[in-house]
Image (tube, rainbow, N blue to C red):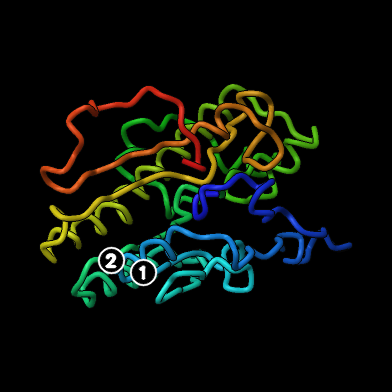
Amino acid sequence: SLFTGLFPSDHGVILGEVKASDESDDRYRTKVLSPDAATIAEVLSEAGFYTFGVLPPHHLGTEYGFEQGFAEFYGITSWPGGDRQKLSTTNALIESITGKFFGYVHFLGCHAPFVPRYRDADYMASYGFEYDEEARREAGIDFTTTEISARVNDGELDLSEEDVKFLHVVYEAKLRWTDQELVRPLIESLKESGRYDDTLILITADHGEELYEHGGLAHGHALWNEVLHVPLIAKYPKGRKPQELGAQVSSLVSSVD
């Protein structure tokens, strides 16, 4: 929907057949995007932009048709360290391209699990509190794995108030890590190359994350606001921001827009 401006009922790319084994990567397989669907990369390519995509291949690989319109298309697995590789690949592309470009970069830095190495240390020092993470991990409350989401959503595990408070802190610490270690260097690279002032930067997400607000974790199983309400941040080229736009826009938009 981000690529085409179409609802799933129109573009047809929905979850495909779930295989017998839940351990198989095939459970993520989706239907292929029709070549008849016009993507933003195709539109901008035809308008003279050089186009590239740097993204995780398990949902957005070439076998699903998402490479339509991209001159260069790199599928880079995010774990471990893949987001940094995406950053270096993107920066190298920006440095090598001389004309106008459209780049789609898909980080997974905000995604569960919330392991210590991807928590911003300053944020943890400011907002962390006394919490025996190791003891809670032994009790089955382990936010450094993705398995906890299924166990909570299936009703096998209940979180205490302290668990939920800690979950929010480590989630926010990972957001800060993503901001400092991935987004900031990308913006600095644009500035160093002299392209920042002339570049439109859009930051959004494909989904939010449920943090036990309604008794569940993660995403893909519910349609609460914490999953649906994602950021949309725009940095316009210098002097090109429409005068009628304020600092914030209150009107409702969605990924098809």
Mark 1 closeness class: few <14, some 14–19, many ≥20 residues within 10 Å: many
For mark 1, give the secondary structure. strand
- Mark 2, residue position: 101
Please give the name of the residue rendered at 36% of the width and 69% of the height, measured from the top-left corner. Answer: 51
Relative to the observer, which residue lies in front, 36 or 211?
36
Please give the name of the residue rendered at 36% of the width and 48% of the height, measured from the top-left corner. Answer: 177
Q: Quadrant of residue 81?
A: bottom left
Dot 1 amino acid type: Thr
In this rendering, is residue 68 above or below 254?
A: below
Q: CA distance from mark 2 to mark 1?
A: 6 Å
- Point out residue 148 in the picture as x, y percentages from the top left corner: 68, 44
Dot 2 amino acid type: Phe
Q: Quadrant of residue 196?
A: bottom left
Relative to the observer, which residue lies in front, 213 or 124?
213
- Point out residue 80 in the picture as x, y percentages from the top left corner: 50, 66
Q: Is residue 231 left or right of residue 191?
A: right
In this rendering, is residue 131 above or below 83?
A: above
CB atoms of marks 2 and 1 within 8 Å: yes
- Point out residue 248 in the picture as x, y percentages from the top left corner: 29, 26
- Mark 1, residue position: 51
Please give the name of the residue rendered at 47% of the width and 39% of the height, measured from the top-left corner. Answer: 171
In this rendering, is residue 36 above or below 207?
A: below
